[in-house]
Image (cartoon, rainbow, N blue to C red):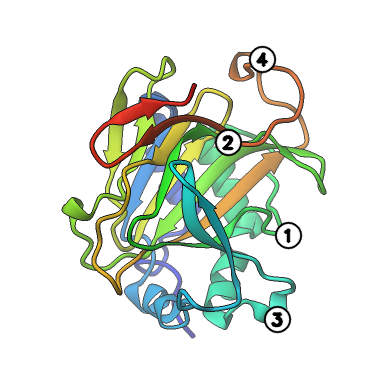
Amino acid sequence: MIQYYQKLGQDFQNVAVLNKEEYSRNKPFPHIVIDNYFSEEVLDSILEEFPGPESSVWHSSNQESVQIKLRSNWIDNAQIPIHTYQMINFLNSGDFLRGLSELTGIEGLIADPYLTGGGLNCILPGGQLAVHADGNWHDLMRVHRRVNLILFLNKNWKAEWNGQLEFWDVKLENCEKKVEPIFNRIVVFTTHDYTFHGHPAPLLCPKGESRKSLIMYYYTSYPRPQDQISSSGVHRAEWKITHDGSEYKSFQ
């Protein structure tokens, strides 16, 4: 059986306890970057079954200057490749959720068995994702979105290809952090109306390469604190900053 942890006994609860203070104080909003948590054997198995760009499993978004990407659109669990399915089950397990609550300080986190918006992501050359604040609501489960987790799957990624995950300040004046999307890197961050993030610069990776990730979203039955809400009501992603390959531009 494939061992999920980087080393035997390294459960996520321990990782959470060691990193929760850093998570809470990181800027411009609470987040953590964790490298080499999973065994390479596990992630290699996921890469081996990762769908090609022509696969029918993908939903394609092609909004110029906003989002140009592929996202898995599984109709039922039987479509999910076996090792990817095992990883999703692990990331949605009660043990992992307890650790995630410890890390983030957000109690009662709920997984999304429907994978609404989550799952595999693939960004091809020229693809991008404008800086944005995430949607705040899960229509089917009627719960509030609170935490994002990204597991990057990119071996031998080069910085000059772009694709860095960018975190912007609350005034949208500066990109305060860039995270390289390298293999076996987990990024966890609190999401609300002021957690602006994306990878707006179009990808410059060569043909045959792509930016691969597994993305998971987590929710609570109770609403976000009032200081994390910019406007009342349900909203989808709110796009803020794009990039035309040479400079950042604000959406008007």
Residue at 31% from the left image edge and 50% from the top image edge: 163
To which residue does mark 2 refer? 134
Residues at marks 2 and 3, CA–CA distance in whole angstroms: 28 Å
Label located before the other in sequence (3 or 1): 3
Q: Position of residue 36 (x, y in %)?
A: 31, 60
Separation of marks 4 and 1 at Cα, in angstroms? 27 Å
The residue pinned by badge 3 equals: 78
First in residue order: circle 2 vs circle 3: 3
Quick one: 163 or 91, which is closer to the camera? Answer: 163
Residue 76 lies, in percent from the top left, at 74, 74
Amino acid at pointer 4:
Gln
Q: Residues within 10 Å of mark 1 (few under 14, many from 20)?
A: some
The residue under label 3 is which amino acid type?
A: Ala
Q: Secondary structure at mark 3?
A: helix
Q: Nearer the viewer, mark 2 or mark 3?
A: 2
Q: In this orientation, does residue 79 appear?
A: yes
The residue carrying mark 1 is 114
Residue at screen point 60% across, 36% down: 237
Residue to which mark 4 is pinned: 226
| Residue closest to the eye, 145 or 87 | 145
First in residue order: circle 2 vs circle 4: 2
Mark earlier in primary sequence (1, 2): 1
Q: Residues within 10 Å of mark 2 (few under 14, many from 20)?
A: many
- Residue 246 in the image, given as x and y percentages of width and height: 23, 37
Q: Nearer the viewer, residue 203 or 230?
A: 203
In this rendering, the answer to whether 4 lies above or below 132 is below
